[in-house]
């Protein structure tokens, strides 16, 4: 199928090494290129990210193995999984393998949940929409159907309750990561 490729067998796995520049294929085309072969043999494929050097062969092998496991857990109906499509899912999965989310999330974050439950508010959701919209007040207030001054009041309340500095890029990254990690854990 691939004249510019090599096939190896390792631990019940078929490994295909393919020089994409010599095969006139793009990395994104690999799943469709392999589809018939995979369906006929009832195989699953893990496709690593492209590597520029043979020295990264071990990394590529590990990426392919991991993405099969994660991809199959998330969508068992697929025949192939590309590591670049599941990269962040791999990070969340690795984080949660040995630790619970409560260990990985700053305790101050959970103050929002407690406050929301006690007062019937939605500060945690407000913060998420605000971060998802990259701190754009107009888009955030539009999505939440609230006035801009109401949004600013809520954001001040969030900063006062948690002590988070929402102008700090590292804090925002950690908070976005927290939301994604909790989403992934619920899945």
Image: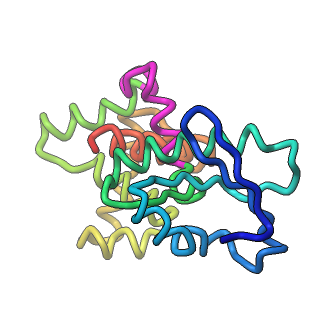
Question: How is this picture coloured?
Answer: rainbow
In the displayed structure image, the side of residue 27 where residue 114 appears, left or right: left
Residue 165 in view of the camera: no
Of residues 113 and 58, the one drawn nearer to the viewer in this rendering: 58
Between residues 86 and 67, which one lies in front from this camera angle? 67
Residue 60 lies, with reference to residue 94, above or below; the image says below
Q: Is residue 36 magenta?
A: no
Q: Which residues are magenta?
A: 88-106
Please count the marks in the image.
0
Res. 84 visible in picture: yes
Q: Quadrant of the N terminus?
A: bottom right
Which residue is depicted at the point 68% across and 56% down?
A: 49
Q: Which residue is more in the foreground, 127 or 92?
A: 92
Most common SS among magenta residues: helix
Q: Is residue 109 left or right of residue 150?
A: right
Residue located 52% across and 63% down the image: 134
- Name which residue lies at 39% across and 45% down: 179
59 relative to 35 in the view: left or right: right
Query: Which residue lies at the image location 52% right of the left edge and 46% below the top edge?
Result: 67
Residue 28, above or below 117: below
Q: In the rendered structure, does residue 103 fall within the stretch colored magenta?
A: yes
Query: Residue 47 location, x and y as percent?
Result: 59, 55
Measured from the top left, where is residue 2 in percent x and y?
71, 70
Percent coordinates x, y for residue 28 in the rendering: 61, 72
Q: Quadrant of residue 57?
A: top right
């Amino acid at each position: 199928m691939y004249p510019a490729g090599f096939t190896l067998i390792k631990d019940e796995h078929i490994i295909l090494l393919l020089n994409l520049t010599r095969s006139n294929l793009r990395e994104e085309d690999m799943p469709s290129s392999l589809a018939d072969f995979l369906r006929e043999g009832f195989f699953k494929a893990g496709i690593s990210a492209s590597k520029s050097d043979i020295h990264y062969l071990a990394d590529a092998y590990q990426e392919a193995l991991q993405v099969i496991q994660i991809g199959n857990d998330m969508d068992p109906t697929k025949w192939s999984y590309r590591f670049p499509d599941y990269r962040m899912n791999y990070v969340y999965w690795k984080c949660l393998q040995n630790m619970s989310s409560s260990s990985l999330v700053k305790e101050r974050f959970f103050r929002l949940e407690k406050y929301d439950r006690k007062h019937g508010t939605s500060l945690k959701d407000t913060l998420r929409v605000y971060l998802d919209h990259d701190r754009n007040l107009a888009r955030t207030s539009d999505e939440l159907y609230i006035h801009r001054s109401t949004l600013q009041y809520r954001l001040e309340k969030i900063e006062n309750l948690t002590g988070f500095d929402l102008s700090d890029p590292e804090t925002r990254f950690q908070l976005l990561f927290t939301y994604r990690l909790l989403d992934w854990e619920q899945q």
